[in-house]
Image (cartoon, rainbow, N blue to C red):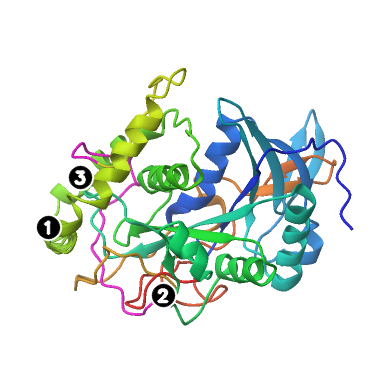
């Protein structure tokens, strides 16, 4: 039995998890959980033993100096708790780490043990994949579940995906078999600009999470970062006529596919979010904005010219609205290791939970360990 010390009794807790690696294109998902941890000042109460789940030749430990004393940080997954006050208080259990290298069933069972001891009511797992979606349009985010009843009550898609999967899919199935309601939220990242960070995709995930759990999430500087990111990609695309033409093709396909939805569900969702942000005592606050709309969202994606790609292999997930469009050859996806925009959570040899090297990062449909890139969107629908 897991014994927790110093963790108060939680109010209607929801576990929100994200893992760097194959299911985290552009580091969008892990960055979203990191944002929640920073904005709500999460308190770490547990870290999994890195020795049990990680191959240190894949996710290497790092050495650092602390007041002249050399210490080692190890790749790990850590858990923190945040207390969200207000008229309708609700607590979150945040799980952030790296996709494990081994013993996935034991890994999921250990996380479920924490969920049971903390009285978690629902598990939400964030992921990001590469898809044929233009950077100039709102990021498609799909909510999927394996539970038919949950799909009906929360207006989610019931997953029909078959194929390779990552720790997001394994944890969701483990929750379902354990009788714990579980939902996966997937953001589609443009495959022609997959380098991390991608604040626009992170913002889209947080907006969808806000709708799902009914909490007003402080966005801080994220909307400004998202606008800067889109502006940077716009400028790079304008320098290359081939890229600009390809983006226009994606825009036309996306606009045609989503035209019927423009006056229905999407508008209603945006209006509900607007009302929630105008609740008494909440106020709009600095940095409160939504990811949708006509305003550009951008942040410099890195140096060099971008080249538009054409995914050749299906990956484990897909998001509605990211229809396949033929384009030029793809650029490798988000880099792994130290190139990540957000460092993974780690377990310090000195006893404290620190951060360290990142895991694998997705860009195509190859299984983890064979390609440093991440999953693309096949025609079969979102994975898990």
> Mark 1 or mark 3, which is nearer to you?
1
Instruction: Give me the disc on residue 315.
Output: 2
Q: Quick check: 25 left or right of 8?
A: left
Mark found first going from the N terminus, 2 or 1 = 1
Label 2 with label 1: CB-CB less than 8 Å: no
Rendered view: 339 above or below 359: above
The magenta segment: 293-314
Residue 88: where, in percent of width, then height?
56, 31
Query: Are the two marked residues, 1 and 3, in contact with CB atoms closer than 8 angstroms?
Result: no
Residue 330 among magenta residues: no
Which secondary structure is most common in the magenta stretch? loop
User: Pointer 2: residues within 10 angstroms few (<14), some, or many (20+)?
Assistant: many
**Between marks 2 and 1, how big is the CA–CA gap?**
24 Å
Measured Cα–Cα span from mark 1 to mark 3: 12 Å
Magenta stretch holds residue 294: yes
Residue 204: x and y, percent? 38, 46
Task: Tell me what residue is drawn at x 32 percent, y 77 percent.
Answer: 379
Q: Which residue is mark 1?
A: 248
Q: Secondary structure at mark 2?
A: loop
In terms of image quadrants, where is residue 161?
Answer: bottom left
Residue 108 visible in the shown view: yes
In percent of width and height, residue 62 lies at: 71, 49
Residue assigned mark 3: 234
Q: Is residue 156 left or right of residue 354?
A: left
Label located before the other in sequence (1 or 3): 3
């Amino acid at each position: 039995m897991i014994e927790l010390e110093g963790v108060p009794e939680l109010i209607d807790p929801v576990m929100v998890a994200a893992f760097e690696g194959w299911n985290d294109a552009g580091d969008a998902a892990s960055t979203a959980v990191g944002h929640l941890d920073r904005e709500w000042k999460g308190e770490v109460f547990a870290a999994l033993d890195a020795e049990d789940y990680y191959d240190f030749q894949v996710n290497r430990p790092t050495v650092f100096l602390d007041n002249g004393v050399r210490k080692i940080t190890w790749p790990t997954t850590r858990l923190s708790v945040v207390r969200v006050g207000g008229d309708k208080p609700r607590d979150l259990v945040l799980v952030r780490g790296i996709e494990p290298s081994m013993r996935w069933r034991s890994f999921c069972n250990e996380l479920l043990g924490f969920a049971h001891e903390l009285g978690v009511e629902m598990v939400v797992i964030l992921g990001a994949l590469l898809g044929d979606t233009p950077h100039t349009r709102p990021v498609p985010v799909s909510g999927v579940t394996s539970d038919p009843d949950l799909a009906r009550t929360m207006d989610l898609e019931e997953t029909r995906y078959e194929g390779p999967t990552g720790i997001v899919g394994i944890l969701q199935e483990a929750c379902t078999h354990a009788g714990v309601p579980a939902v996966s939220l997937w953001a589609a990242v443009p495959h022609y600009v997959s380098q991390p960070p991608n604040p626009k995709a992170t913002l889209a995930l947080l907006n969808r999470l806000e709708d799902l759990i009914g909490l007003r999430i402080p966005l801080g500087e994220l909307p400004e970062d998202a606008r800067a990111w889109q502006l940077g990609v716009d400028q790079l695309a304008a320098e290359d006529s081939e890229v600009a033409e390809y983006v226009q093709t994606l825009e036309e396909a996306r606009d045609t596919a989503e035209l019927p939805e423009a006056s229905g569900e999407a508008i209603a969702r945006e209006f509900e979010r607007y009302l929630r942000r105008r609740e008494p005592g909440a106020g709009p606050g600095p940095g409160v904005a939504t990811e949708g709309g006509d305003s550009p969202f951008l942040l410099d994606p890195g140096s060099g010219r971008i080249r538009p790609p054409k995914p050749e292999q299906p990956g484990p997930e897909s998001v509605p609205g990211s229809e396949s469009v033929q384009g030029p050859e793809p650029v490798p996806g988000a880099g792994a290791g130290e190139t990540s925009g957000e460092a993974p959570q780690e377990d310090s040899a000195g006893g404290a939970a620190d951060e360290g090297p990142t895991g694998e990062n997705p860009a195509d449909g190859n299984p983890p360990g064979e390609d440093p890139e991440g999953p693309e969107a096949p025609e079969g629908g979102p994975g898990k």
